[in-house]
Image (cartoon, rainbow, N blue to C red):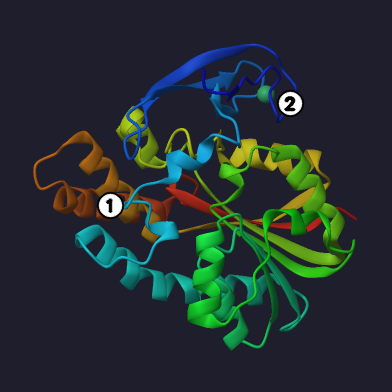
Amino acid sequence: MAKTVHIEACPVCEGKEFKTFLSCSDLSVSSEKFDICKCADCGFAFTQDFPAESEIGKYYESNDYVSHSDTHEGLINKLYHQVRKIALRGKAKTVERYSSAEASTLLDVGSATGYFLNEMCRCKWVVTGVEVSDGARAFAKQKFDLDTQDAEYLYKIKEGNKDVITMWHVLEHMEDLNKVMARLHRILKDDGIAVIALPNKDSYDAQAYGEYWAAYDVPRHLWHFSPDDFTRFATKHDFEVVAIKPMYFDSFYISMLSEKYKGTFCGSLVGLMKGGIYFLKNLANHRGSSSLTYILKKKK
Ligand SMILES: [Zn+2]
C-alpha cells in the first residue's frame, strides 16, 4: 500500500469539515484518481490523500513536465520556451518594482533549472537557489554555473537574512505548507518582500475546465488557492499582501494543456484561442487570472 498523507485539519483555518469539491485524474503521469476537498469553513481546497514525500518522485517522471525539463519538442513546449524569456523579464521587473533594496540578496525557493536566478544575476542580484531535484541543480550548474542548494538548506539560512524570497509555482507542491511559510517569515529581513506565484482556483479557466483544468495537476499540486484563501493564509503567518499581479501567459499555456487533457481535436489551437479569450477577460478582472503573483511584506 502506497504511503499517503490524509489531511485532518484545514491548513489555512484548522477547520475539520470538508466536502469533496472535484474528483480529478492525474492526466500527465499516472492516470490515478485523487479527490480535491474544500474546507466547509473557509473554502480553501486541497488534494486529499496525496502521496507522501517519499513516494511522490515517480509522479514527476513525465516528459511533459516542462518546468523541470528543457525539451523543445511540440507546439506547447516551443511556445512555453519562447514565452519563458518574456516571462523572466516580467518576474525580474516585479521583484525590482516592489523591493526596497536594490540588487541585494535574493533567495529563490524551487529554483528548478536556474533560468530565473540567471536573469537576476544579470541584474546584479546576489542570488541563492534551493531546489529539491538533483537533476535540475546539475542543469543549473552546467548551463549557468549556479551553485544551488538542496531542500534542507532552507532551514539552515540565518534569520533576517534575505531582501527578497521568490517562489514561482512552488508552494503548491510543498507538503509542509505552514512550516515553509513560517520559515519564509523568519529568514526575510524586516523590510524584505516575498513574491509567491500560485495557480488561481477561482480563475475563469479553472471554472470552465473543471476536473480537466491543467493547474489542478494532482497529485503534484497539493494546495489550491484563490486570492481570498491566500490572503487569509498569508495574514495568519503575519504577512501583509501588498499587491496581487496577474500572470497573463499562464491562461494560454494552461488552456492549451487542459484542451489536450480533454482530448479535444486540435487541442493546442483551441486552447490558444480560448487562452486569448481568458487573457482579454483577465485584463478587465485580474482576479480571474489563471495564475497570480502575490507580493508580501512582513506586518509591522
Ligand atoms: Zn479552512
Q: Amino acid at mark 1?
A: Gly
The residue most toward the left is 265
Residue 47's tag is none
Mark 2 Cα shell of 10 Å, populated few (<14), some (14-19), many (≥20): some
The residue where tag 1 is placed is 275
Residue nearest the observer in this picture, 9 or 242 = 9
Task: Please tell me whether residue 225 is drawn above or below residue 268 in the rendered image.
Answer: above
**Percent x, y for residue 151?**
69, 54
Residue nearest the observer in this picture, 102 or 25 = 25
Q: Earlier in the sequence, mark 1 or mark 2?
A: 2
Task: Please tell me whether residue 76 is drawn above or below residue 230 in the rendered image.
Answer: below
The residue most toward the front is 1
Task: Please tell me whether residue 259 is drawn above or below residue 38 in the rendered image.
Answer: below
Is disc 2 placed on a helix, strand or loop? loop
Left of 291 or right of it: where is 137?
Answer: right
Quadrant of the image occupied by residue 13: top right
